[in-house]
Image (cartoon, grey):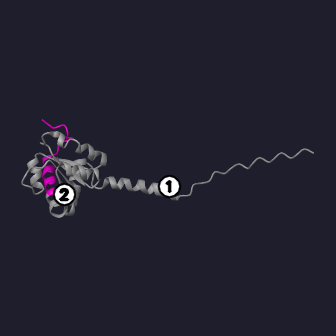
Amino acid sequence: MAKSYVKFEVQKEVVGKIAETLRLAKQSGTVRKGANEVTKSVERGLANFVVMAEDVDPEEVVMHIPTLCEQKKIPFGYLPTKLELGKAIGMNVPCAAAAIEKPGESEHAMKEVISKLTGKSAGSEKAQEAPKAEKKEAAKAAPKPKKESAPAPAAAAPKQ
């Protein structure tokens, strides 16, 4: 039975890439381990990618993380078991969640995994945001045309 916090099913081919991305990030970057550390990382906006195990019990331990990630626009994925997640980040014990803060050498692999999970090409959001920012800057820089005011009505000549 699927847990309530699992928002989507991850394809088997992507599961292996997620685990490999975590291994690379652990070796050359910064990875936060455990539900509490992941929550802090997401709330502070430091996380670049979050991974949770699908078999966490009680599920309330990680139930809030997908919602936080969606609010902060941080991509997330799942691994089937806590043990698999723990091994991917170099631990000999199970782990409920992990967050990649600094990807290091895993940056390319992480972008590839994110694009497969979201269905968007890597960097497409940034490409869409850039023109919007340019339009805003152009609008601010362009002088606004002044409204031509109608000439003031001539004062009525005094009667003589």
Per the image, label 1 sits on a secondary structure element best described as: helix
Q: Residue furthest right?
A: 160
> How many numbered tags mark residues here?
2
**Residue 8 lies in the magenta stretch:** yes
Residue 141 in the figure: left or right of residue 80:
right
Give the number of the disc on residue 58: none
Q: The magenta stretch spans which residues? A: 1-22
Per the image, label 2 sits on a secondary structure element best described as: strand
What residue is rendered at 20% in x and 60% in y? Answer: 30
Residue 13 in the figure: left or right of residue 150:
left
| Frontmost residue, 61 versus 136 | 61
Give the number of the disc on residue 139: 1
Where residue 34 appears, x then y in whole percent?
A: 16, 50
Graded by Cα atoms within 10 Å as few (under 14), some (14 to 19) or many (20 or more), the crowding at tag 1 reads few
Determine the image quadrant of residue 48. Answer: bottom left
Determine the image quadrant of residue 105. Answer: bottom left
Q: CA distance from mark 1 to mark 2?
A: 41 Å
Give the number of the disc on residue 31: 2
Q: Taking 85 as reference, is 58 above or below it?
A: above
The C terminus sits in image quarter: top right
Residue 147 in the figure: left or right of residue 14:
right
Q: Residue furthest top?
A: 1
Q: What amino acid is at disc 2?
A: Val
